[in-house]
Amino acid sequence: KKATITIDRLRIIATIDNRIYGSFIEHLGRAVYDGIYEPTHPMADEDGFRKDVIQLVKKLNVPIIRYPGGNFVSGYNWEDGVGPRSERPTKLDLAWFTRENNEIGLHEFSKWLKKVDSEMMMAVNLGTRGADEARNLVEYCNHPGGSYWSDLRKSHGVLEPYAIKTWCLGNEMDGPWQIGHKTAVEYGRLANEAGKVMRWTDPQIELVACGSSNIDMPTFAEWEATVLDLSYDQVDYLSLHNYYGNPTDDTPSYLAKGIEMDEFIKSVVAICDYVKAKKRSKKKINLSFDEWNVWYHSREADQFNERWQFAPHLLEDIYTFEDALLVGGLLITLIKNADRVHMACLAQLVNVIAPVMTKTGGKAWCQTIFYPFLHASLHGRGVALQVNVDSPKYDCTQFTDVPVLDAVAVWNEEDKTATLFVLNRSLEEDLDLSCDFRSLKASGVLEHIVLEHADLKAVNSVENPDNVVPVQSRGASLAGGRLSCVVKRATWNVIRVS
Ligand code: AHR
């Protein structure tokens, strides 16, 4: 079978905000302790951070990392994590029913962020706390000095302000599982008031309000409209969260979940613009898809966890090859929506539903999903271009008319390269792809990277870390501005031309 793609240099979606390649570290399970931080590990650096993990995270080139939660933040007192370590309290974390000893807090995490060349997306607790603690945290982090909280930071050894730009106003406040769960009216008012005093403390910051925890929440849409109605002038972004899974082993439907993500994004954009119109506002609210990933493999195991453990194994999904295909498809969807999605966080980064895994005391390795994320983060920077895809279609249990081939292109003006990200969702058919690159004046193929495996359920592990890894394909050719290659069945492809 055949598929064709036409790219027009002038059909620009948007310049991609690199923050769509963000990620997330929560105080949850072994993400922080025994993940990024393991002072007794042979690879630990002078601060107790694992150098092997730093190396893998750096490879991913993640521009922004959300911290410290997640559900965790809704019961967190940030003051517990600053100041002399010997005086920091051990507390019960009611989000995950574990113990938190606060050995890692804001300063230690900031140090780690420097080591991995990333920035913080800071979340404040609007579950058990409110506007006062949130504005104190902004003052502590971002005010130069001469006030109680900024001088306290200085007394803790950090003289220069952190200048943290992006702040999340709580986490999943629509969810009954959230510590301090709120109605849309309660949260909308609180987001407005907290946002107001945080911004008065530092006018340079950007604020993200909580949207729905996922598209299936019964309050979805009404929640977004009410929250924005009550906080429009104070917020810059609205968040989206969604996790995907294949619990019924229906791979054709699973690989089409990018369609669901696209509909979710389009619906939230519509709500933002509805409130904009209603308010006759000139301000546009953009989106922060600050939790997305595959999450389902570990759910059953986690139900039996003993309470109040320290850094237990939680949410340790082991990802299959088909999960990596879906993650590739979701990245294509995020890039296609780069005009409104300005931030996104692959949730999470280390050990907890993560591309990077560690064995406590042992090695670190890359899960299957590491690779599509790596490719998008490295080559998906520049201008997102609309592509015209003509491909066979299929029907499955959850969708009809699913294009077998999903694709998006990114033009990098600096090095005059174009990258085509392509997912072949078919489990049976290879496709002969012809792609018209004439408008980009492309004359040669730089590389065609393929992630493929005979077994959809193949995984990487500490014993076999290179079971699913990308390979270079040799068959692609470009003549007269037209590319031809074979896009094998069930593959993720990165085709780069210049
Ligand atoms: O990422 C894991 C959890 O998923 C987060 O803590 C929460 O925000 C979401 O429900």
Image (cartoon, rainbow, N blue to C red):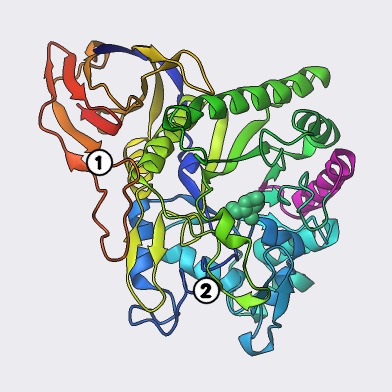
Looking at the image, is mark 2 or mark 1 earlier in the sequence? 2
SS state under label 2: loop
The percent coordinates of residue 209 (x first, y second) are: 72, 42
Q: Is mark 2 within 8 Å of ligand 1?
A: no
Q: Nearer the viewer, residue 342 or 260?
A: 260
The percent coordinates of residue 363 (x first, y second) are: 32, 71
**In the visual, does 324 lie left or right of 69?**
left
Magenta span of residues? 182-206
Q: Residue at x 58, y 56 (%)?
A: 300
Placement of 312 over or under 479, stated as above or below: below
The percent coordinates of residue 387 (x first, y second) are: 37, 16
Q: Residue at x 69, y 69 (%)?
A: 97
Residues at marks 2 and 1 touching, judged by CB atoms closer than 8 Å: no
**In the visual, does 255 lie left or right of 183?**
left
The residue carrying mark 1 is 453
Q: Is residue 281 visible?
A: no
Quarter of the image where one finds residue 398: top right
Looking at the picture, which amino acid does disc 1 mark? His
On residue 281, which mark appears?
none
**In the visual, does 128 lie left or right of 122?**
right
SS state under label 1: loop
Residue 187: within the magenta? yes
The residue carrying mark 2 is 33
Residue 220: within the magenta? no
Placement of 77 over or under 355, stated as above or below: below
Q: Is residue 96 visible?
A: yes
Q: Residue at x 51, y 54 (%)?
A: 348
Quadrant in which the N terminus is drawn: top left
Placement of 466 over or under 392, stated as above or below: below
Name the mark nearer the viewer: 2 or 1.
1
